[in-house]
Image: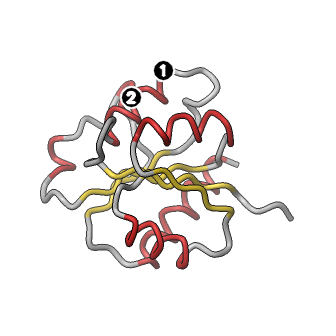
Amino acid sequence: MKKKKIVIAEDDEVIVEILREGLEGYEIYSALNGREALELIQKEMPDLIIADVMMPEMNGVELNRRLKREPGLCQIPVVIITAKPDMQKHFSCVGENEVAGFLEKPFTIEVLQEEIKRNLEKAD
């Protein structure tokens, strides 16, 4: 069975490594900012995207907004992660900004795995 592809858009390389190790059952690609992530997503066509809110060049909110406007990419579930407390209250999760999930750091790898599993099952 072919492994599902996940793109991680996160500027903290330590977090990327932790996620990569914890998500070993998936084909993982990573980008250190939103612009790199957008190019990688267009190239790899992942099954799911994990995007940090705070990144250089293009943040996770803008990355999600751009993906939702692209016909070939808008169906890919995006899970937003952030270290900013109460960010979810300020994040519009309706219309073109809709996200598949929202996790506040710190979270456990088990919580992320459940979020990924839920979204991939919903997408199938």
Residue 65 is marked as: 2
Q: Residue at x 38, y 28 (%)?
A: 65
* Front residue of 39 and 5: 39
> Which residue is painted at 13% across and 55% down in the image?
86
Q: Position of residue 41 (x, y in %)?
A: 59, 39
**Amino acid on which disc 2 is placed:** Arg
Helix, strand or loop at label 2? It is helix
Q: Position of residue 77 (x, y in %)?
A: 53, 44
Label 1, secondary structure: give it: loop
* Horizontal arrangement in the rendering, residue 92 relative to residue 18 (left or right): left
Q: Which residue is mark 1?
A: 69
Classed neighbour count for the residue bearing mark 1: other residues with Cα under 10 Å, few (<14), some (14–19), many (≥20):
few
Mark 2 Cα shell of 10 Å, populated few (<14), some (14-19), many (≥20): some
The image shows residue 21 at horizontal and vertical percentages of: 55, 78
Give the number of the disc on residue 89: none
Q: Quadrant of residue 94?
A: top left
Please say if the residues under marks 2 and 1 sit with CB atoms less than 8 Å apart: yes
Q: CA distance from mark 2 to mark 1?
A: 7 Å
Is residue 66 or residue 40 the one in the foreground?
Answer: 40
